[in-house]
Image (cartoon, grey):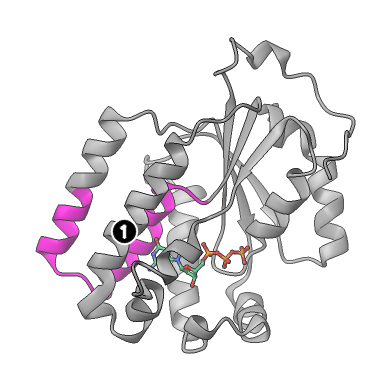
Amino acid sequence: TRIELPRPDYTMLLNGSKARFTVCVEGNIGSGKSTLLNHFSKFSDVQTFQEPVQKWRDVKGNNLLALMYEDPKRWAHTFQAYVQMTMVEQHLQPCQAPVKLLERSLYSGRHCFVENLYKSGKMTNAEYTVYCEWFKVITQNLDVGVDLIVYLRTDPDLLHARIKQRARCEELTIPFHYLSDLHSLHEDWLMGTTGSLPAPVLVLDANDTLANMFKKFEEHTSEILCGKL
Ligand code: DGT
């Protein structure tokens, strides 16, 4: 059931039925992106797009997510190529609601995960280059822009505990250094000066209880749905 909630006025963003405000939620593994999406899915003017993890787990019977964790040197490039394709699909999905809310984006694949896999020797220079060339062709030619990034900034120690607790089978072998490396790359990209940000960033401290996170979502509703930073 969809609940009508008080909402900010974003009519000025509307330009016919196609116009929309596109927001992507970013943050390390286990930072609470799905929780944010679930919260805002209750708004009638928001359409949410969950990350297609289920697709990655069953590509005609192949669990690419598991293969990537089991043998990253062999599978990282294949996995990232597929992730990139499914992310393009998310970006291009038509959205009838004024606000399109995406879990992750093409951009975190490129700037966080792939950068990490390459730096840690899990992708060869040739694989990395092919992936990056694809990324360039996509971002220069397709309508994959975003208007706002919400960064759920979380301490990797806390994430390690959360991931253990949720016990998603593919993630049981994730070592702490993987999360701290990914954290540094999220920081460099979203808080730093790499110059590769596709949109302004709203930073939310996500080292908090669920109840407090819901309060923060409410406090920041107009920024998240309307970009009033
Ligand atoms: P949440 O709601 O913040 O707890 O989000 P998660 O942890 O369910 O979602 P996410 O995107 O952080 O990760 C889901 C799984 O997929 C996790 O094992 C990391 C992996 N993953 C997501 N995107 C990529 C990617 O581009 N490359 C690699 N290597 N792994 C990825």
> Of 101 and 179, which appears nearest the observer?
101
Q: Residue 109: where, in percent of width, then height?
A: 38, 56
Q: Residue 170: where, in percent of width, then height?
A: 47, 82
Mark 1 sits on what residue?
Answer: 82
Is 53 on the left or on the right of 125, as rendered?
right
Is 49 on the left or on the right of 166, as rendered?
left
- Label 1 sits on a secondary structure element that is helix
Q: Eyeballing the image, is 211 above or below 198?
A: below
Quadrant of the image occupied by residue 212: bottom right
Quadrant of the image occupied by residue 178: bottom left
* First to last magenta residue range: 104-132
Q: Residue at x 22, y 50 (%)?
A: 132
The three-letter code of the residue at mark 1 reads Tyr
Q: Eyeballing the image, is 122 above or below 6?
A: below
User: Quarter holding the C terminus?
Assistant: top right
Residue farthest front in this picture:
60
Q: Residue at x 64, y 14 (%)?
A: 14
Ligand 1 under 8 Å from disc 1 Cβ: no
Q: Eyeballing the image, is 159 above or below 36?
A: below
> Of 179 and 137, which appears nearest the observer?
137
Q: Residue at x 19, y 60 (%)?
A: 128
Q: Residue 84: where, in percent of width, then height?
A: 34, 52
Q: Residue at x 67, y 62 (%)?
A: 32
Q: Residue 142: where, in percent of width, then height?
A: 32, 30
